[in-house]
Amino acid sequence: MTRSEGDTHGAWTQALGRGMALFSGGFSLLNVLGSALSPGYDANHWWIDLRPLPHLLSLALLGSAGALWVAHGLRAASGARRSVTFLATLFLLAVTASNAVTAVTMRLAGRIGGSSWVPFSLAVTLGLSAVLVSLSPDDEVQAPGPARVAAVVAVLALLAPLAQMFSFGRTDYRRPADLIVVFGARVYADGRPSQPVRDRVATAARLYRDGMAPRLLMSGGPGDGAVHETEAMRDLAARLGVPLRAIVRDPAGVDSQSTVRTATALCRERGWCRVLAVSHGYHLARVKMAFQRAGMHSVYTVPCVNTLGAVQARLMAREVAALWYYYLFALPRRGA
C-alpha cells in the first residue's frame, strides 16, 4: 500500500468513526430532548439499554455522551476532550456488548425465538468500536473532511432501520397475553385477502390455537371493493379455527397509528395489560415504537410467517422512510 492509499484508508477510517459518533450523538440528544417534551419519546434503550439505572441518570449519561460524540463528529476530539470522549465511549461499548450477550442468552434459554440470532446491540457495539478507533491519537492520519463524514451519517440513517428490521423484526417475543392485535393489509376488489393478510392472520390464528391469548383484534381499513379488510380477516381467521366470539373488529385501523390508538383504548377500557402484536418483521419496530409512545409497554411483537418473497425488498425500502417519519414527526404530535 502506497502512502497515498494509506492516507485515504486512514481518512475513511476516521470518517467512519466520526460519522458514527455524529449519528449516535444526534440520536441520543434527540431522545433526551424528546423525552422532556413528549411522554414515551425516549428510544435510547433501543440501542443502548441502561434501564437498570434510574431514568434520570441514564438520560444524563447518554446526554453527556451524545454531546461529546456530536462534538467529535463535527471536529475531531483532542486533548482532554479526547480522553473524556474515549472513556465515555468505552463504558457504553461495554454496555452494548453486555446487551448483546443478554440477547443471545435469552435466545439460548428459549425466552425469545425467531429467525435472527444477531442482536441489534451487536451492530451498535461494532459502531462504537469504530468511534474508539477514530479517537486514537494519530496526527499523521489525513483528516476525512466534512463530505465523507456526512456520507457516513447518510448511510447510517439508511442502515439503522434496516438493521432493526433484520434483528428486532425477526425476533419472536411471544408469551401469554390478553389480546392479539393483527395489523391489516390489502383486500382485493373481489374480497380476496392479499398475501400479507393471509400471513398475518395465519400466525395470529396459530397463536390463538396455542392458547397464547383468548381474543384477537382485527384492525384495518376499507378494501379495494365492498369487503372491508377486517371482514376478510375475520372470515379467514374463522376458517383457520378461531371462533367468531373471540374476534373483535376495528374498522378504523386505516394506518398503524390508528390501530395502536384503538388497541390501547380497548385495553385500558377492559383492563387488559398484555398484547401480542402480529405483523411482518419489517413493520414491527414501528409498531413497537407506536405502542410505546401510546403508553403501552407490555406489548410483545411476533413476526408472522413470511411468503412475500421479492416483494419484501420494496416494502422494506418504504418502511425505512416510514420508520423515520413516525419517529421524527408523527408520534410526538399524536402519541400519548
Image: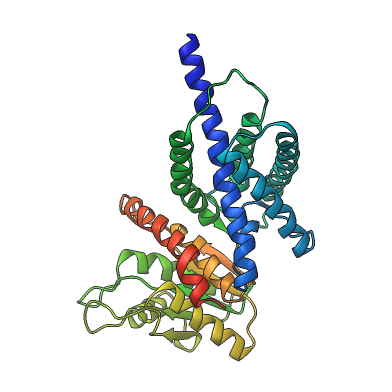
* In the image: residue 257, left or right of residue 275: left
Task: Report whether residue 109 is seen.
Answer: no
Q: Residue furthest top?
A: 2
Of 269 and 307, the residue lying toward us? 269
Residue plotted at (50% across, 21% down): 9
Task: Please state the horizontal and vertical placement of residue 121, each as a whole percent of the image.
Answer: 62, 47
Q: How many marks?
A: 0
Residue plotted at (33% across, 78% down): 229
The quarter of the picture where residue 240 lies is: bottom left
In the rendered view, would you say 200 is above or below 172?
A: below
Of 245 and 254, the residue lying toward us? 254
Task: Please state the horizontal and vertical placement of residue 148, each as a whole percent of the image.
Answer: 45, 34
Q: How is the image coloured?
A: rainbow
Task: Please state the horizontal and vertical placement of residue 139, each as a whole percent of the image.
Answer: 63, 20
Residue plotted at (54% across, 27% down): 13
In the rendered view, would you say 28 is above or below 132?
A: below
* In the image: residue 283, left or right of residue 22: left
Instruction: Report the quarter where the C terminus lies.
Output: bottom right
Task: Report whether residue 310 is seen.
Answer: yes
The quarter of the picture where residue 176 lies is: bottom right
Of 116 and 322, the residue lying toward us? 322
